[in-house]
Image (spheres, helix red, strand yellow):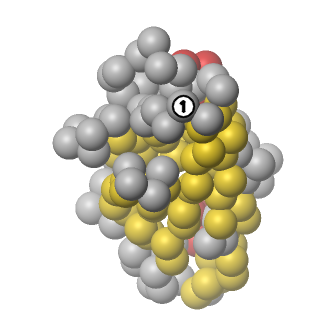
Amino acid sequence: QVQLVESGGGLVQAGDSLRLSCAASDRTGSTYVMGWFRQPPGKEREFVTAISRSGGNTHYAGSVKGRFTISRDNAKNTVYLQMNTLKLGDTAVYYCAARTLVYSGIAYSARNYAYWGQGTQVTVSS
């Protein structure tokens, strides 16, 4: 089992940048397929981006492609979400998630992720 802790959220203005971090702790030192999801106010949780275990494969939701970048540092057991040119519509609680070790492929549905962080609030103001 892995524990996930997000950090880096906050209040920014439209057009600004922000970097979220997700620290994973696992007794075995394993690496996991990781994803970022977000839940805007009054809406369902939605896929943002995901990254393979090695970091060599990534996928983005159309709404963030070209603005957001996911990366990972397996030596630090940390996944990052660099968010540039933030828009009002990016306001949400952002969650880090991990698939179980059985799976090596990226998934786009929240139901395919077994482990979740507590979430970090990102608010973009005009």
Q: Quadrant of the C terminus?
A: bottom right
Residue on which disc 1 sits: 28
- At horizontal 52% and vertical 46% (from top left) the residue drawn is 36
Residue 52, above or below 85: above
Of 24 and 11, the residue lying toward us: 24
Residue 123, above or below 100: below
- At horizontal 46% and vertical 80% (from top left) the residue drawn is 17
Camera sees residue 126:
yes
Of 11 and 81, the residue lying toward us: 81
Camera sees residue 70:
no
- At horizontal 61% and vertical 35% (from top left) the residue drawn is 27
Residue 78 spot, x, y in % from top left: 48, 55
Residue 7, above or below 118: below
In this image, 56 relative to 94: left or right? left
Residue 74 spot, x, y in % from top left: 38, 50
Residue 45 spot, x, y in % from top left: 66, 38
At label 1, the amino acid type is Thr
Element under disc 1? loop
